[in-house]
Image: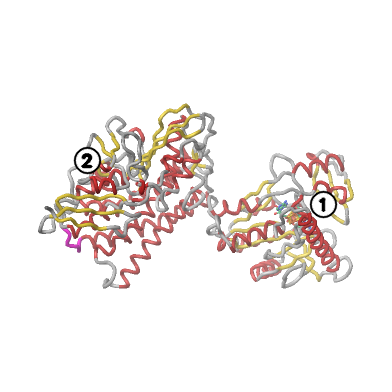
Amino acid sequence: MVLGKYTDVMTVRATDKALLRQSQDGGIVTSLFIQALENGVIEGAVVAMPTDEPWNPQPYVATTPEEIIAAAGTKYVLCPNVNMVKMAAREYGLDKIGMVGMHCLTYAVRKMQLYPFGARHLPNRMALLLGIFCTENFHYEGIKAIVEELHRVNIEQVKKMDVSKGKMIVSTTMGDRVEVPVKLTHNYVQPGCFVCPDLTARTADISTGSIGSPDGWSTVMPRTQVGKDLFQSAVDAGIFETKPIDPGKFGMEMLTNLAQKKWDRSVKTRQERAEIGLPNPF
Amino acid sequence: MANVVEMAPVTRVEGHSKLVLETNDDGIVEKGNYFSITPVRNFEKFLIGKPMEFAPLATSRICGICPITHSCASVEAVEDSIGVEPPKDGMLLRELAGIANRMHSHPLHSILIFPDFGCGVGFDKNVYTEAMKRCQGMRKIAQNIIDVVGGEGLHAPDIVIGGMRHNISDLAKNKLMSNLRTYEALAQEHTDFMLGLFKDSDYPADMGTHDYNVFATHLTHGDRTAFPMDTFSQELPNNYYSSLEVGLEANNEICLIAGEPVEVGPRARAVKFKGFTQRGAMGIQVARVRENQTSVHRAENILDELNTSGPTNVRVSGLGDGKLGIGINEAARGANVHMARVNEGRIRYYNCLVPTMWNYPTISTALEGDPYKYAEVIVRAYDPCNSCATHMIVLDPEKQVIENKLIY
Ligand SMILES: Cc1cc2nc3c(=O)[nH]c(=O)nc-3n(C[C@H](O)[C@H](O)[C@H](O)COP(=O)(O)OP(=O)(O)OC[C@H]3O[C@@H](n4cnc5c(N)ncnc54)[C@H](O)[C@@H]3O)c2cc1C
Ligand code: SF4
């Protein structure tokens, strides 16, 4: 239940080595969007595009493979992609829209599709939702403080950020690698994340994340027919190499446990909020 | 004593209105009264004291058919008051939104008048269905333009003081252009179909004529410099209509130029800017269906001219010192004039002279000399929008409310 419905789950990475270097994990999101663009499944996708301010992305309607690649990589910062979805259907003129996001974003889009108040045309124009796993996220000031105060790295010199095995790892343009325990970052987590129950973006067409697969690979869960067809077309085109996911301790077991942990954290947070009289979103 | 024929509400027009006709024994109208009975809505009053940004948002809600014309006239009145001039691409997109509003309203009007020309019960079902589909197809394309340009098909939030909130992408521009080509073809078929209906009808050619002037400021957008500030007047209905009883029941004001009614709308624009000569109700019908073509061509030109990377708005720095600003948008039904005084960012005075306010007295006169049975057909030719036109409280000179029941 905590992982939602999925038609398959496996360990995957892109075959294009250059793309792998630019991506966060297995290059799944970037490859799938490019495949969807080329297949005509989407006309563009809302992604988190870097801006002039280092590590503070903005939602962006990418309509070319180059733009999609430019937005690859995880930014541990709130990026309101949903906001841009409506614009994609309006001034960008997209009839088939893709979007990437963690649970809170994909869930919001599904709600807009169900109850399209103020979101006319969106229900039938949302063509592809790619979900990324997510435990928590930060405001820009929060992530800046973590990197500069805890890692002691100037945010302008950060090349990549990653969370793995209980550590938040910052790699710098100078080739350094600085780790701090994730639990030190908890004070900076945006509070909404503690209420959030879903690790694996259960409402997406395809969900992906690093948990459950070795470094450089991704766990991929096609969930809907759209997701299944797109993923299969990418495999058939030789874009991905796949292998069965490890069912054991570092594979499915870990994924399920961490998803359950996030679920339990949400239940507990909501109880605590209710006890002190704070409203809960669900 | 003349016979009096009353019809209320007049059907297949926007909003609620009433006809009170004095006829002779042959049923010919000798005195026509056409007026609004839509409840008063007080937009101009509740805007006072509100931030200027609220004016286009609020006045857009005057009407669900023509929200865009009100937003456009409103922002332009505010811009004129505070001294702001939007950049070229912003004005192009704004004009496009306004035209698109017209391009969806005119086919809707055709649907409303189909039965007046035998196109309804008893008409060839397939032809009727095709005609309906064509109208709805045109409306869909036009509404989509507003979605893209204005951010929302109905009450477009992106028509803002200073310009338009955003430009459009090249992809959007290309898609709109391709849709406009489809519209062009549909509009041609629609015009042929409507002209055929008009030709086959046996309404007299001079039905609904009058001798008043036309008033139009621009063919496709609106031009505040063409507003006759010195000669226009607004009158209370009780002074205007043939009896005080009618005047008190009327919820609309009367707008005049040099003390005389004027005709606004598609025929007025065609007469003023295209040398059109046909008069009366049928003249208006013909001018209206032809205007779809004018609109679609101008829309294509706008897209051609549009630089999708150009700025579409300017930063608004001034907050106004109470100068009277005027914004005019040539709506589907004619010149829609908004006036605003903005002081320190707040609306201090607001006035809307919407198209049908100009046309009420003109329609009333145009009814005279024709059989009362044609009265609704004549009224519909003017495509009145009564929802827009109700905006007053009836006060006597001491500012005492004359009719409490008019106030909602
Ligand atoms: C805040 C956050 C927390 C995460 N937490 C976990 C976790 O706990 N466990 C786990 O396994 N995976 C987590 N992920 C997902 C993981 O980091 C990778 O994004 C995911 O595996 C996809 O990798 P990829 O190589 O396929 O994607 P890429 O090909 O690199 O593409 C990533 C895509 O995500 C978009 N993106 C990046 N940042 C954001 C953002 N902030 N908001 C919206 N879209 C964004 C990019 O624009 C790009 O399109 C998290 C991601 C984010 C953004
Ligand atoms: S934890 Fe939940 S609310 Fe927070 S960013 Fe991730 S998906 Fe969104």
Q: Is disc 2 surrounded by few (<14), some (14 to 19) or many (20+) residues within 10 Å?
A: some
Range drawn in magenta: B199-204
Residue at disc 1, CB closer than 8 Å to ligand 1: yes
- Membership of A117 in magenta stretch: no
Q: Is residue B29 visible?
A: yes
**Residue annotated with mark 1:** A162
Horizontal side, residue B159 vs residue A6: left or right: left
Front-most of residues A15 and A139: A139
Above or below, comparing residue B102 to residue A130 in the picture: above
Q: Residue furthest top?
A: B321
Callout 1 amino acid? Asp
Q: Which quadrant of the view contains residue B185?
A: bottom left
As helix, strand or loop, the secondary structure at mark 2 comes to strand
Colour convention of the picture: secondary structure
How far is disc 2 from disc 1 in space, using C-alphas?
74 Å
User: What residue sits right under mark 2 in the picture?
Assistant: B213
Identified at 34% across, 68% down, the residue is B130
Subunit that carries the residue with mark 1: A
Residue A70 visible? The answer is no
Q: Amino acid at mark 2?
A: Asn
Q: Are marks 2 and 1 on the same chain?
A: no
In-image side of B289 versus B4 (left or right): right
